Image: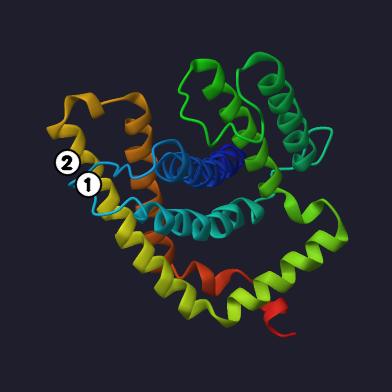
């Protein structure tokens, strides 16, 4: 039973990382429309004061990646044939090949174009899924990567209070975005789309994750007691 619980927690950790990446992808897609595709466009106006709010949501999601991945790193699930990062590279490679040959967009622009076709979304899912698996097992890629990540962890630990304050602030902004988009969808039927449903769902999870990580003081636990002594 304990084995099943560990696997469930690992899946939960991966889901949180994937959600953070998906939130970033959604925000980047809208920002690309604001700056390049439809210059001057004000998304979800008047309920959203400014499209630049999405930059703050990107920060909120990015701050969630590390503690989300850390949840899974603490679990000993073992591995099947290879390290998890190998599967991450494989999924990324499959995703890149799929996007190149079976979608009308390129790998470099797939998160920037305003295209919600099923084939394009499938490519996005594969790329984000591969990146999720890679981030989950990133320290095992090489000793150099592990050392670099440990330096980042040490730096983050030293400014953990500032990071937690930023997580609270960006979480509040993400909550505002969630409410604004929901209000816009209620008032304007044309805005009730699958893409916007995904946006509000990922933003809500990002918001809740931000507050929960702060409440649980996740940034106080990013380093082991042994690492804290050095």
Say which of 21 and 34 sits in front. 34
- Return the residue found at the far top: 102
Q: Which residue is mark 2?
A: 183
Scheme of image coloration: rainbow
**In the rendered view of the protein, which quadrant contains the N terminus?**
top right
Instruction: Where is residue 2? Give x, y as percent.
Output: 58, 43
Q: Which residue is mark 1?
A: 180
When the figure is inspected, residue 84 is found, relative to residue 223, above or below; the finding is above
When the figure is inspected, residue 97 is found, relative to residue 66, above or below; the finding is above
**Going 52% across and 24% down the picture, which residue do you hit?**
121
Q: Is residue 164 left or right of residue 77?
A: left
The local secondary structure at tag 2 comes to helix
In this view of the protein, can residue 51 be seen by the observer?
yes
Q: Residues within 10 Å of mark 1 (few under 14, many from 20)?
A: some
**In the rendered view of the protein, which quadrant contains the C terminus?**
bottom right
Q: Is residue 145 left or right of residue 229?
A: right
When the figure is inspected, residue 97 is found, relative to residue 218, above or below; the finding is above
């Amino acid at each position: 039973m304990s084995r099943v619980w560990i696997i469930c927690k690992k899946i939960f950790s991966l889901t949180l990382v994937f959600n953070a990446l998906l939130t970033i992808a959604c925000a980047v897609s809208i920002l690309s429309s604001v700056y390049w595709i439809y210059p001057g466009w004000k998304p979800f106006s008047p309920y959203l004061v400014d499209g630049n709010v999405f930059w703050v949501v990107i920060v909120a999601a990015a701050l969630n990646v590390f503690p989300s991945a850390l949840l899974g790193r603490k679990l000993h699930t073992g591995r099947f044939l290879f390290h998890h990062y190998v599967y991450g590279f494989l999924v990324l490679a499959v995703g890149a090949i799929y996007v190149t040959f079976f979608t009308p967009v390129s790998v470099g622009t797939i998160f920037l174009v305003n295209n919600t076709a099923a084939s394009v979304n499938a490519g996005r899912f594969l790329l984000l899924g591969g990146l999720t698996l890679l981030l989950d097992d990133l320290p095992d890629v090489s000793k150099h990567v592990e050392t670099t990540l440990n330096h980042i962890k040490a730096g983050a630990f030293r400014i953990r209070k500032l990071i937690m304050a930023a997580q609270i602030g960006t979480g509040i902004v993400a909550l505002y975005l969630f409410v604004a988009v929901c209000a816009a969808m209620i008032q304007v039927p044309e805005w009730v789309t699958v893409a916007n449903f995904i946006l509000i769902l990922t933003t809500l999870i990002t918001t809740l994750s931000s507050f929960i990580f702060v409440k649980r003081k996740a940034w106080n636990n990013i380093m082991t007691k042994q690492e804290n002594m050095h």
